[in-house]
Image (spheres, rainbow, N blue to C red):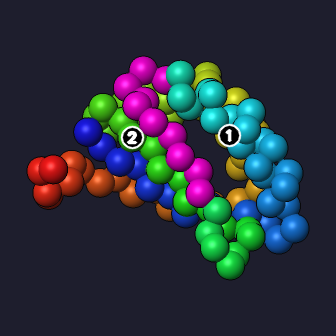
Amino acid sequence: MILEHALLQVRPGQSDAFEGAMAKARPIIARQPGCQSVEVRPEQGNPDRYLLLVTWDRIESHRDGFRRSEDYQLWRGLLHAFYSPMPEIAYYGASIFDD
């Protein structure tokens, strides 16, 4: 399992519009092969920053699947105009603790 992490800095005053666009975009990524979950959380005290967490079965499902798909172009068209700067994506492996 891979956890994709991105801090989304939204242009000031655009958080309501961003949340509306994300509501449309979330099903696009959620239907991708290998996508297991999608979370978007607002930062407390900063209405223009969000944390995107996507759980993938493996990194290739995101990097080589979704990012190269037509659906990614839909996602991009809905969301990328809101970001300043563009988010940096990081991938994390399985937890070091077995619960």
Q: Secondary structure at mark 2?
A: strand
SS of the residue under disc 1: helix
Is residue 59 shown above or below 41? above
- Where does the N terminus fall, quadrant-wise? top left
Instruction: Count residues near mark 1 (Cα–Cα under 10 Å), then give few for <14, some for 14-19, many for 20+.
Output: few
- At x 59%, y 57%, the residue is 41
Q: Residues within 10 Å of mark 2 (few under 14, many from 20)?
A: many
98 left or right of 22 in image:
left
Label of residue 98 in the image: none
Q: In the displayed structure, would residue 4 be above or below residue 47?
A: above
What is the residue that sits farthest to the front in this orientation?
99
Q: For residue 96, what is the image quadrant?
A: bottom left
Q: In the depicted view, which residue is nearer to us: 59 or 51? A: 51
Image spot of residue 30 (x, y percent): 54, 29
Residue farthest bottom in this picture: 45
In the image, residue 75 sits, relative to residue 16, either above or below, namely above
Q: Is residue 37 magenta?
A: yes
Looking at the rendering, the stretch of residues picked out in magenta corresponds to: 32-41
Residue plotted at (38% across, 26% down):
34
The residue under label 1 is 76
Q: Main secondary structure of the magenta part?
A: strand
Q: Earlier in the sequence, mark 1 or mark 2?
A: 2
Callout in the foreground (1, 2): 2
Instruction: Residue 94: give x, y in percent of width and height.
Output: 21, 49
For the residues bearing labels 1 and 2, Cβ distance under 8 angstroms: no
> Disc 2 marks which amino acid?
Thr
Residue 39 in sight here: yes
Report the amino acid beneath label 1: Arg
- On the question of residue 84 being in view, the answer is no
What residue is shown with label 2?
A: 55
Q: CA distance from mark 1 to mark 2?
A: 19 Å
